[in-house]
Amino acid sequence: MTVSNFTQYIESIIGGWMLDILLPSFDKYQFGAIKGCSTAHALISLLHEWMETLDAGGSVRTVFVDFSL
């Protein structure tokens, strides 16, 4: 095992351990950096919230901004 592989291995263990500890404190709408969650999950959640608001007679206003360098 090379030093690089060893450090990646240790990093994955510590990262997993930290995520297990911090995950309960994340917002329920946090989708990035969580295993099993993706952009598709974020969009589905967003659409679900919008539909619930509209069904209840509310209105939805949104702005999307795409930042790129």
Image (cartoon, grey):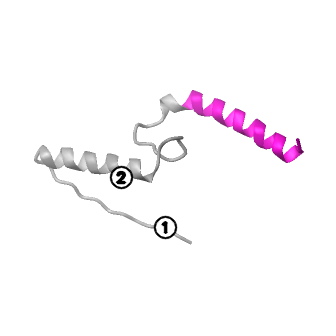
Q: Which residue is mark 1?
A: 67
Q: In what element is the residue under mark 1?
A: loop
Give the dominant element type of the magenta stretch: helix, strand or loop.
helix
Q: Which residues are magenta?
A: 1-22
Does residue 66 lie above or below 55 as drawn? Answer: below
In this rendering, the answer to whether 17 lies above or below 5 is above
Describe the element under mark 2 as helix, strand or loop: helix
Residue 6 position (above or below residue 44): above
User: Which mark is in front, 1 or 2?
Assistant: 2
Is residue 3 within the magenta segment? yes
At 39% from the left and 49% from the top, the residue drawn is: 42
In front of the other: 14 or 64: 14
Q: In the rendered view, does 10 fall on the left or right side of 42? A: right
Q: Earlier in the sequence, mark 1 or mark 2?
A: 2
Q: Position of residue 21 (x, y in %)?
A: 58, 27
Report which residue position mark 2 lands on: 43
Looking at the image, the residue that sits furthest to the bottom is: 69
The tag on residue 50 is none
Residue at (40% x, 52% y) in the render: 40
Identify which residue is drawn at 88% across, 44% down: 3
Q: Residues within 10 Å of mark 2 (few under 14, many from 20)?
A: few
Amino acid type for the residue under numbered disc 1: Phe
Q: Are marks 1 and 2 in contact (CB under 8 Å)?
A: no
